[in-house]
Image (cartoon, rainbow, N blue to C red):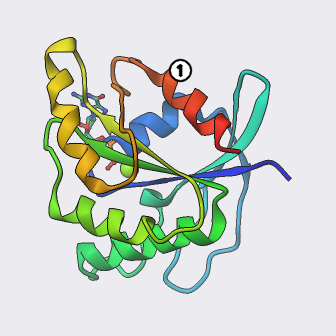
Amino acid sequence: MKPIVAIVGRPNVGKSTLFNRIAKKRVSIVDDMPGVTRDRLYWDAEWLNHEFTMIDTGGIEIDSTDHILTQIRYQANLAIDEADVILFVTDGKAGVTFADEEIASILRHAKKPVILAVNKMDSIKDAHEIYEFYNLGLGEPTPISAANLLNLGDLLDAIVAAF
Ligand code: GDP
Ligand code: MG
């Protein structure tokens, strides 16, 4: 079986944008469970001869009336259960938020590798925004711009090195 990479992060950080840049084709449909739609979540991807399967946990919604933190905790734990490598996406324009700290506190206990991406670093003048993300305690953050396709090669290198 191919390694599974799960994308985790609070809403609006750019998970879907990044996912669409990396993923190639839909591979499987898992039966819906009550209150959980996993349809269209598993996609094939490839980088330098490494094949893997991706999941965007942001596409998984439990009861939509649930609090954002409930969603985030659920998605982080799902990634911990299912993934071989967890890709945690944050927003460099917004900076570190309470929800990011909540996700980080869950992922720090995961016995799986976590790659920390700081998205929306669209130009070199945004570079200093990276430093506060070290405080999440998940190692070196990788600055990217999913929109402008910046540094995605370095991010993919870090992902496949963790397999
Ligand atoms: P998700 O909720 O985490 O899946 O986030 P989306 O992929 O839906 O993106 C949320 C918003 O951020 C959209 O308006 C995107 O166009 C925008 N966005 C995504 N990636 C980037 C980026 O690299 N730079 C900037 N400036 N905006 C981005
Ligand atoms: Mg999304």
In the displayed image of the protein, which residue is found farthest to the right? 1
Q: Amino acid at mark 1?
A: Gly
Q: Residue at x 38, y 28 (%)?
A: 146
- Locate residue 140 relative to residue 55 in the image: left or right: left
Q: From where the camera sits, is residue 37 visible?
A: no
Q: Please provide percent x and percent y for residue 114.
A: 50, 52
Q: From where the camera sits, is residue 144 visible?
A: yes
Q: Please provide percent x and percent y for residue 80.
A: 56, 68
Q: Residue at x 25, y 30 (%)?
A: 120
In this view, the residue in front, 158 or 145, is 158
Residue 131: quadrant of the picture: top left
In the displayed image of the protein, which residue is found farthest to the top? 124
| Disc 1: residue Cβ within 8 A of ligand 1's nearest atom | no
- Locate residue 10 relative to residue 7 in the image: left or right: left
Q: Please provide percent x and percent y for residue 149.
A: 41, 18
**The C terminus sits in image quarter:** top right
Q: Please provide percent x and percent y for residue 16.
A: 42, 43
Q: Which residue is mark 1?
A: 153
Residue 44: quadrant of the picture: top right
Count of numbered circles on the image: 1
Q: Secondary structure at mark 1?
A: helix
In this view, the residue in front, 47 or 55, is 47
In the picture shown, does residue 94 fall above or below 30?
above
- Locate residue 66 relative to residue 109 in the image: left or right: left
In the picture shown, does residue 5 fall above or below 150?
below
In this view, the residue in front, 8 or 62, is 8
In the picture shown, does residue 132 fall above or below 73?
above
Badge 1 density bin: few <14, some 14–19, many ≥20, Cα 10 Å: few
Q: Residue at x 31, y 34 (%)?
A: 119
